[in-house]
Amino acid sequence: MVDPDYRTCWFGQKSVRVGAFVNAGKPLLAVIPLDAVYIAANFRETQLARVRTGQLVDIKVDALPDTVLQGTVESLGPASGVSYSAVAPHNATGNFTKIVQRLPVRIRINQDQPGAANLRVGMSVTPKIQIGK
């Protein structure tokens, strides 16, 4: 169900036009809710020792050079991307080089920030999690 307040949503990938025929199951457009924007950051496992849900995050966005947004760690992923891969990579047998995995961390953007309205899907960001000492 789409939020009736269309001011909080963007519509993208519109593949339907007036007079066009549509088929069942074919996507017509993508709805992007701007009030639920989040970042999926992939941190190295060695960086996650003291990361916890609820910690504050400073976010620098490449496309907005003079803006630092605030966010909160919403969740830590349960497994690395390799764990969900259909075909797992097999490193050379006998190779004892450790491969550092990356784990997803979901960061929620705090609401009511002036620069948050300028975020778009796929932008590059640099998150810095404020961990307690």
Image: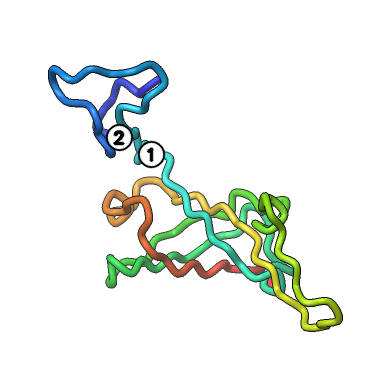
For residue 123, above or below residue 20:
below
Which disc number belongs to residue 8?
Answer: 2
SS class, disc 2 = helix
Which disc number belongs to residue 16?
Answer: none
Q: Measure how far apart labels 1 and 2 are at the Cα level.
A: 6 Å
- What residue type is disc 2 on? Thr
SS class, disc 1 = helix
For residue 62, above or below residue 114:
below
Pointers 1 and 2 in contact (C-beta within 8 Å): yes
Mark 1, residue position = 35
Compare residues 6 and 122 and report the one nearer the observer. Answer: 122
- What residue type is disc 1 on? Asp
Figure colour scheme: rainbow
Q: Quadrant of residue 124?
A: bottom left
Position of residue 61 measured from the top left corner of the image (x, y, whole percent):
36, 66
Position of residue 59 measured from the top left corner of the image (x, y, whole percent):
44, 65
Q: Residue at 36% of width from left, 22% of height from top? A: 2
Along the horizontal axis of the image, is 82 left or right of 3? Answer: right
